[in-house]
Image (tube, helix red, strand yellow):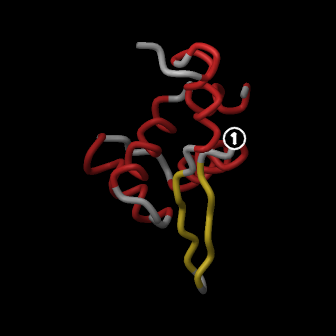
Amino acid sequence: MGDVFKALADPTRRAILDELTERDGQTLFEICTRLINKHGLGSSRQAISQHLAVLEDAGLIETRREGRYKFHHINVGPLEPIVTRWLTPNGRRST
């Protein structure tokens, strides 16, 4: 769970996850373009690639290769234990 919190601590990584939530299956180029246009984040492709690696290491994104393209997909699975731990007492929804 520590890797998930570390990955979510950075605002650029949260913006990347927002973009993948809005439109899943983007390439690095598409993510960079959307971050510039929608969030005003002018990070280099190398910097965004490093952010993607942190997100992938935490299990928050998965990648798929098609030819020379690498597509990034959001994976919400690692967030479920966090939601269960703090938002649902004993794993059940409170009413």
Quadrant where the N terminus lies?
top right
Instruction: Quadrant for the C terminus, please.
Output: top left
Please tell me how crowded label 1 is: few (under 14), some (14-19), or many (20+) other residues with Cα within 10 Å: many
Q: Quadrant of residue 16?
A: top left
Depth order, front residue of 39/6: 6
Three-letter amino acid code at the position of disc 1 = Ala
x and y, in percent, of residue 49 in the image:
59, 53
Q: Is residue 30 above or below residue 77?
A: below
Residue plotted at (42% across, 57% down) = 31
Q: Is residue 6 above or below residue 66?
A: above
> How far across and down, in percent of the image, does residue 9 sit?
56, 25
| Residue at figure coordinates x 68%, y 46% from the top left | 59
Front-most of residues 58 and 51: 58
**Is 88 or 8 nearer to us in this picture?**
88
Q: Give residue 62's quadrant in the image.
A: bottom right
Q: Is residue 19 toward the left or the right of residue 93 in the image? A: left
Q: Nearer the viewer, residue 14 or 43?
A: 14
Residue at position x 36%, y 48% from top? 35
Q: Secondary structure beneath disc 1?
A: loop
- Residue 8 position in % (x across, y down): 56, 30
Name the residue tied to disc 1: 58
So how many labels did they put on this image?
1
* Residue 91: x %, y % from top left: 61, 22
State the residue at coordinates (40%, 49%). Answer: 21
Residue that sits furthest to the bottom in the current view: 67
Is residue 78 shown left or right of residue 11?
Answer: right
Q: Against 66, is 44 above or below? A: above
* Left or right of 31 on screen, residue 39: left
